[in-house]
């Protein structure tokens, strides 16, 4: 009951913040796109941390069409990883979630990839909805920042989690065999 109420409050707060953001900032331009993405990241993180979903859906399993990550490599996932290192995200993330050479740490890290992917997926669809609205209401060029930041801050992180998770799962299997 408490968890459900907290999730409701988080969703209500998110809607309220989006309303004020749209009302006082408008829906066009870089600043709106930037603030929307990071505000949603904050609220979705609270939502997923409260929800604590087991993320057992088949969606989180590696699919045949992913070709063991080759599709992500073709989409430039290595370039995105280099960008994360360049901006310091990788160092910050490793400090927050260090990779340890034990089974519990790998299982936790694999779960975090699912949780992170779920969060970015939620944000991707919300920002995508705003992108479509702005493109229809104003113009495609008016939605350019929303589209660009949605790709950079949500789409590529989703691809990265889907690229990394099978590797973590193989490492977990190796540990379990020992």
Image (spheres, rainbow, N blue to C red):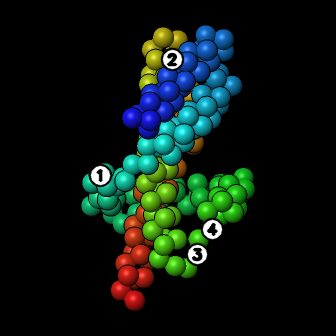
The residue at the point 49 percent across, 64 percent down is 108
Residue labelled with disc 4: 98
The location of residue 72, given as percent across then percent down, is 44, 57
Marks 3 and 4, Cα distance to the nearest angstrom?
A: 6 Å
The residue at the point 52 percent across, 71 percent down is 105
The numbered dot on residue 57 is: 1
The residue at the point 53 percent across, 25 percent down is 14
Marks 4 and 1, Cα distance to the nearest angstrom?
A: 26 Å
Marks 3 and 2, Cα distance to the nearest angstrom?
A: 44 Å
- Badge 1 marks a residue whose secondary structure is loop
- Badge 4 marks a residue whose secondary structure is loop
- Whether the residues at callouts 3 and 4 have beta carbons within 8 Å, the answer is yes
Marks 2 and 4, Cα distance to the nearest angstrom?
A: 40 Å
Marks 2 and 1, Cα distance to the nearest angstrom?
A: 32 Å
Front position in the image: 18 or 37: 18
Height in image: 158 above or below 23? below
The numbered dot on residue 134 is: 2
Q: How crowded is mark 3: few (under 14 residues within 10 Å), some or many (20 or more)?
A: few
Label 4 vs 1, first from the N-terminus? 1
Height in image: 31 above or below 89? above
The location of residue 171, given as percent across then percent down, is 44, 77
Front position in the image: 81 or 52: 52
Q: How crowded is mark 4: few (under 14 residues within 10 Å), some or many (20 or more)?
A: few
Marks 3 and 1, Cα distance to the nearest angstrom?
A: 26 Å
The location of residue 174, given as percent across then percent down, is 40, 82
């Amino acid at each position: 009951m408490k968890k459900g109420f907290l999730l409701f409050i988080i969703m209500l707060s998110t809607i309220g913040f989006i309303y004020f953001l749209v009302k006082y900032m408008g829906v066009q331009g870089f600043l709106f796109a930037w603030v929307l993405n990071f505000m949603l990241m904050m609220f979705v993180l609270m939502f997923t941390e409260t929800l604590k979903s087991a993320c057992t859906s088949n969606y989180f399993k590696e699919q045949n069409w992913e070709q063991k990550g080759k599709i992500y490599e073709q989409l430039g996932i290595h370039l995105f990883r280099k960008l994360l290192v360049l901006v310091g995200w990788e160092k910050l993330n490793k400090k927050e979630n260090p990779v340890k050479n034990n089974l519990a740490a790998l299982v936790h890290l694999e779960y975090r990839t699912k949780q992170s992917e779920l969060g970015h997926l939620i944000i991707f669809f919300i920002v995508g909805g705003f992108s479509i609205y702005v493109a229809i209401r104003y113009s495609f060029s008016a939605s350019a920042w929303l589209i660009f930041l949605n790709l950079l801050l949500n789409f590529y992180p989703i691809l990265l989690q889907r690229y990394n998770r099978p590797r973590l799962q193989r490492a977990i299997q190796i540990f379990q065999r020992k």
